[in-house]
Amino acid sequence: MASFSKFGNDLYTGARSFDIVGRRRIWFSIAAGLILIAILVPVFKGFNFSVEFSGGSLFTVSDVGSSPDQRLATTAVGEVVRGEVPTVVIAGLGTSNTSVRVTTNLLTALKTQDVQSALAKAYNVPESKVAATFIGATWGQDITQAAIEALIAFIVLAVIIMALYFRTWKMSVAAIVALVHDLIIVVGVYAILGFEVSPDAVIGLLTILGYSLYDTVVVFDKIRENTSEDGEKSVRTFSESVNLAVNQTLVRSINTSVVALLPVAAILFIGATLLGAGTLRDISLALFVGILSGTYSTIFVAAPLYALLREGETDIKKRTKKTTVARTTSGAVR
């Protein structure tokens, strides 16, 4: 613990430093590669949309015991509707409230009744224990539209507020680029893993917006503090001041991420493997990937990008040249 504290103290004082800003091409390349994969996979593989988005018939079989067999539902539906491959999910696995959730394409009233009977027979329960629900795709479309509107409103407000708070639009741009990076990565992971894109997943996606910007704002606040203290006699260039700020907040960013990831990982494990709870799984996966991506983007995308946007300004170019000349002169004298 003492060595880790010393490590953090060395980063804060500058005794130890990682050249994060100076190696931004590496980080930008990694981020660009991840984004490219996250975009291409959905294009070729597509998303696994839940019934709320695609529409269809939903059957829920209750009182099926503590460890029901998914294959029974698949076989039962296939015998009634030839060629139908249902999506079968076990909810509450191992508990007294275990149920089987079966999703199919939209069925007629007669076929729905036949499937109910087949599922009841397969799991040896009364037909009253098999609930059938029709879900139209328009409901999911409404959710998607509302989510997009909320996302646009959030980004616009975030840009305005950050520009006013930091007194520069370039910090806002850097923060939003990092935020978009996080959103694309999370969406790509859903496509890669084949997890259902449900309304719960959309909620999780919107939830990570706040975390991503919060971490970025903390780092940017330290950047503003460091750069505002740099005067004519500063021994650091602008990029070096930004890099110092990133190093000073590095331990804090890692600690915050670890503390946030542990409970989310626990919920993801419990929801996906033990309980089979789709809501917990969908929300926690978005949060887990979003927190990881947000930590990376704050440190390796947002801060270096901000330094890049500012390096071309006349005053900063003059100060960088002056600092470089002073170091060269000092080295020559020695």
Image: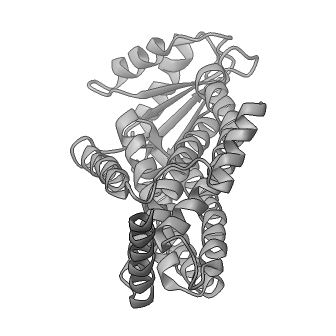
Residue 110 placement: quadrant: top left
Mark yes or no: residue 227 visible.
yes
Please report the residue visible at 59 percent of the width from the left and 35 percent of the height from the top: 281
Q: The N terminus appears in which quarter of the rendering?
A: top right
Q: As rendered, which of 300 and 198 lies closer to the eye?
A: 300
Name which residue lies at 62% across and 32% down.
268
Relative to the observer, which residue lies in front, 28 or 68?
A: 28
* Percent position of residue 257, x then y: 65, 44
Q: Is residue 304 above or below residue 18?
A: below
User: In which quarter of the view is residue 328 placed?
Assistant: bottom left
On screen, 150 above or below 232?
A: above
Of the pair 299 and 257, the residue shown nearer to us: 299
Say whether residue 141 is visible.
Answer: no
Question: In the rendering, at what x and y percent does residue 49 appear?
Answer: 41, 45
**Residue 159 locus on image (x, y percent):** 54, 80
Q: Nearer the viewer, residue 21 or 14?
A: 14
In this rendering, would 179 be left or right of 324?
right
Q: Which residue extends farthest left?
A: 44
In the picture, the quarter occupied by the C terminus is bottom left
Which residue is rendered at x = 57% and y = 74% of the image?
154
| Rendered view: 176 above or below 170 | above
Q: Residue furthest front?
A: 333
